[in-house]
Image (cartoon, rainbow, N blue to C red):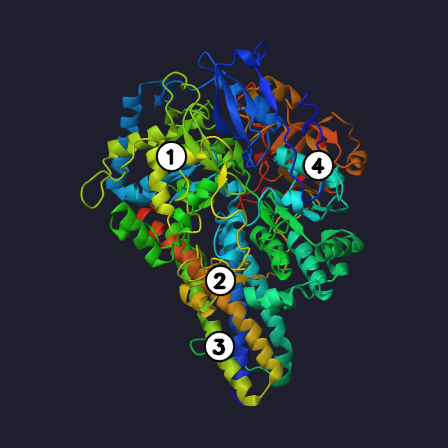
Amino acid sequence: MHLATYLGLLHTSLRTLAGAFREVAKGHGEEPDVRSTCEVLANRLDGQVEKLGPIVDRYGEHRESEPERLHAAEFEQTRGGAVGLLRDLQDLYALASFTDITWTVVGQAAQGLRDEELLNVVSSCEKDTARQLAWLKTRMKQSAPQALIAARG
Amino acid sequence: MDRIADVWGPRTPHGRETDWPVRVDQQLADGIGESDVDRWVQSACVLCSNGCGCDIAVKDGRMVGVRGRAADIVNHGRLGPKGLFGSWQAHRTDRLTKPLIRRHGVLVETDWDTAMNEVVHRSQELLAESGPSSHGFYTSGQLFLEEYYTLGVIGKTGIGTPHMDGNTRLCTATAAAALKESFGSDGQPACHADIDLCDALFLFGHNMAATQTVMWARVLDRLAGPERPRVVVVDPRRTPVAESADVHLAPLPGTNQALLNGLLRAVIEHGWIDHDYIARHTLGFEELKSTVEPYTPEHVAEICRISPVDLLHAAEIFGTSRRVLSTVLQGFYQSHQATAASCQVNNLHLIRGMIGKPGGGVLQMNGQPTAQNTRETGADGDLPGFRNWDNEEHVRELARLWNVDPLTIPHWAPPTHAMQIWRYAEQGSIRFLWISATNPAVSLPELARIRDILRKEDLFVVVQDGFPTETTELADVVLPAALWGEKQGTFTNLSRVVHLSEQAVEPPGEARSDLDIFLDYASRMGFRDRDGDPLIKWKDAEGAFDAWRECSRGRPCDYTELTYEKLRGGSGIAWGPERLYADGHFPTAADYCEDYGHDLLTGATVTPTEYKAQRPDGRAFLKAAEYLPPHEQANAEYPFLCTTGRSVYHFHTRTKTGRSPELRRAAPEPWVEMSPEDAAELGFSDGDVVLVESERGSVEVPVRIGRCRGGVVFLPFHYGYWDVEPDGHQRAANELTRTEWDPVSKQPLYKISAVRIRRT
């Protein structure tokens, strides 16, 4: 059964995403809403990792060794300036989309297995992932015109 | 009668469902008797959001006093100390009477042509260079409706910038946000007369005795009469309001959401809810119920540091009183999870089916006298007429009304909120900032930062005000403005009551009304509509009011029934019915609502598709949110939490009230208030001068031992630097506050700054 591979993937990508939200919070401290919201979302991702724990205990997890396959890219370093913020949020969006679809895939397996515990975890975590994506999109839509048209430097 | 000592005046007790007796308050200048007054000119007071109807006494072309209007539904003749002393006295002193322009680093007097040409030149230069997004407009809750609407049209389509907001962002943004999230649109559901009818009154973070003194006098008259309503107060300080309470809950700053979730849980668990109303008129009950489930009295008591018994007692009063009136103000609006917590107050009323009922409803309060108009007319981060920026048809309506291309009206995202406008100015992408009738160099958080932004070489700052202020000092061009009594216009109070304020006297020197200044700018800029005609087609206040009536037609804030003629004589008149939503039908239909709403934890916007899928169709939203710990916490280095607020004798940054001798004497200097236990532990006595420091800055003030709960200190926010010798910046409370805001309403969090205190 390859579910263990996907659980490993999910586990890693959730941690990567939480780390990336923390990195952006730190790197863009002068944008207070970005800092505080990224911290809130990172803490909630820790909660997702925690919820995944008992599932991993049951199915085990298999970490993929080849990084270019089944592995969310590590978040590098935050960028500066208005356009830099936009790009960092876009990177977060890409990472969050990756975990989003990974939850979907795991959720499909949970349905096939009639695993109610896993289904509940998926359903609560999918809501939170939707929240991450919605916030990132909202914040990027707000920043984009100013960053791309009016910002200097 | 000394109305400085006796703030609320003598009692006129009355019982439930009887009329609030009339009591006419009057103040005339020394040596002036009633027979000396040449004429009385109709107006309403602009020194808080209550909007008391009044007449201005005029003698020899000067304002010499003020008198409450007996027939007005808001105040039945009364006025508070600020209205009696602060409204008319300041007009004589220390005014800006000529435009100023910065030359070689110094502000010098100039004429209107030179000043306006400089403004227009810079404006056109920047439009050509980097387009409309280089412009920001930061206005007020102090102008008149006609002025805001004119400014709104100038900014939103003349220039076409999304960067418009008011200091209303600091005072009532959360009221508007909570109303939009729950009911689909801004608009106050309850009215003043509900005070006369209620069986229980809940004040959430609202020290009404200091913020709206005449409204509190109305409550005191109920408390002194038969069938006294029960009172519950949520405030970390033992305010005069809390002293009148049956239950006083003093939660730690930043924990309102936990407290409200606890109240909701208790009300639901005891079955004090209206199942039929919930089923017919609301959405989201199951999610609300499951979200509040973990908030047991014990759990909440631990988070908020309150007694679980008091919490249950408060819930019982809410759940079992026949008619409950709630009010909400800055203790919620300027604190952590502001919109979420304010929405929970709406939820309490919705699950009891108690909105729009006589004596049963909610007042999401305003702070400033004309803040409602900033919100209605689109001079802030909204579109005019409570239109929805995310609804293409609403934008097209405006474009048709103004005869412009819809593309000129920015609507790709919500209009930019004030804190973000200042950030763009700091980063240099906004390079033209026009500030009208507000004093951000004292009123915004983290003042050292604000001063730095205003001083930036590449930021052109226009400031329009009646007095020299800490902000005009940092401007490139200063425009002298006429004040209340010196110009004509209307404004709308916290319960949607519209008053006409007539011009009583001429403005001093060369000062002009804000409306005339905006019209002059529009004409010099040559703003045109699609047919090449002038964009702004009105020339005076009444013309602007009539244009606004058309703009509001068919929207929730429909003014078409109101005219200047109807507003003359008698009482102010509310737009809409006396109470909104009496039939349980809310403005949530997708094609009608002002906003599609947000996620309360992050502020992520709900998309039109998601909104429509919920099919709200007139039902209200029960929006839920869990409690999150605030980012700013007391710690070993900064062990106290500081909240800021007002003195009953002052308004804002004291530009008017600080120039009234009586009010000035009543509260001449700032102070820091703390609990007797904390003072004893630090070895402070009353009057000891101490240094209050946060990570951002510090103030040096005397200690006043009194009203705070343990671990919490309080600073009044009124005091700046215009009336003291320059000796550093150690007086304004906002030296200490933090640049952070609520994710939904974007209102700054003034009520929660970690500080330490030591003797100087």
The quadrant of the image that shows the N terminus of chain B is top right
Residue underneath mark 4: B220
Residues marked 2 and 1 touching at CB (< 8 Å):
no
Q: Is residue A115 visible?
A: yes
Q: Which mark is residue A102?
A: 3
In-image side of B560 versus B358 (left or right): left
Q: Chain of mark 3?
A: A
Q: Secondary structure at mark 2?
A: loop
Q: Which mark is residue B434?
A: 1
Percent across and percent down for residue A103 are 51, 76
Position of residue B748 measured from the top left corner of the image (x, y, whole percent): 54, 44
Residue bearing mark 2: B618
State yes or no: discs 3 and 1 in contact (Cβ < 8 Å): no
From what the image shows, is residue B480 above or below residue B599?
above
Circle 2 chain: B
Contact between labelled residues 4 and 2, with CB atoms less than 8 Å apart: no
Q: Quadrant of residue B300?
A: bottom right
Closer to the N terminus: mark 4 or mark 1? 4
Which chain is mark 1 on? B
Label 3 vs label 1: CA separation? 49 Å
Identify the disc placed on residue B758: none
